[in-house]
Amino acid sequence: MTRELFDSFWRAAAYCLHPKVIALSLAPLAIVGGIAAALGYFYWEPALAGVRASLDDSALLEPLFGWLRSIGAGAWASVLVPLVVVAVAVPAFVVATLLVAAMLMTPAIVRLVAARRFPRLEARRGGSFWSGVAISLGCTVVALVALILSIPFWFVPPLVLVLPPLIWGWLTYRVFAYDVLSAHASRDERARLLDRERWPLLGMGVVCGAMGAAPSLLWAVSALALVLAPFLILVSIWLYTLVFAFSSLWFAHYLLAALQRLRRDEEGDGAPTDGAVFEVPAARPLDPSRGFAG
């Protein structure tokens, strides 16, 4: 199992350099990034004003602001306002990017991997586009609620490195596993694969979730990051699309290979799989003068 994980990992990394994959990774950036830029241009200042008014009216935060002013750190209150806006905006844009990637980028990447590596793998189409959209939306809502509920724990240093990757990992595992198998596996095959490969897939999701948390480090560089927030949101979305492209490739290589092994096991050892036809050389007539050694 470990060998298959590493094999699919390095194959996915190599496929990230494919021109088609690079082009596909720019599509979610163009769509979601354009929306983010427009919203930032028109609503950045109103959002800051609204959050500032809410914080000023909050009786729970007044002791904190008073303490900051007493130690000469009152300026940090002004840093908190854009930080709250960013903390709410970035997860929303990331989720939108995930949905766009799942609907546009992942199917194209799966077709690319199948055509180049598994050309004889039969497509049994056990899933549909709208089923995939429903599953993606349902899992995204659950992940988004969990992410919002976990925001207070982000201020505890160890938990900020654990909770977001776990949430993104679960979401990545559920969304990409379905999208990869929807075209090539039947419903029964998909259910068996998800059950048999549950733990490797969850581990892959956690790794991809940890990679997806890396762009968030842009906001931890300095307070200058808040001044450049509209630009950094675009950069973050672009980095997320690259992570999603790699995740799609990793899941595609791993699950399509697992589906091929599943069908081989069902058909029995040594049997042709996935519609492959193996030609057997015709037997040559025996030459009596050479005996059985020839």
Image (cartoon, grey):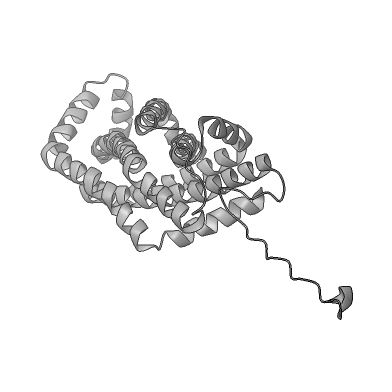
Where is the C terminus found, in terms of image quarters? bottom right
The residue sitting at 50% across, 45% down in the picture is 122
Residue 154 drawn at (x, y percent): 43, 35
Residue at the bottom extreme of this rendering: 289
Q: Is residue 267 left or right of residue 119?
A: right
The residue sitting at 48% across, 46% down in the picture is 208
Q: Is residue 102 left or right of residue 120?
A: left
Residue 259 drawn at (x, y percent): 57, 43
Residue at the left extreme of this rendering: 42
- In the picture, residue 18 is in which quadrant? bottom left
Q: Toward the viewer: 116 or 143?
A: 116
Q: Toward the viewer: 67 or 32?
A: 32
The residue sitting at 45% across, 36% down in the picture is 125
Q: Toward the viewer: 42 or 288?
A: 288
Residue 205 drawn at (x, y percent): 51, 41
Residue at the top extreme of this rendering: 59
| Number of marks drawn | 0
Tell me if residue 227 can be seen. Answer: no
Q: Toward the viewer: 74 or 128?
A: 128
Q: Is residue 35 left or right of residue 245?
A: left
The residue sitting at 31% across, 51% down in the picture is 238
User: In this rendering, is residue 51 above or below 118?
Assistant: above
Residue 90 drawn at (x, y percent): 30, 39
Tell me if residue 87 can be seen. Answer: yes
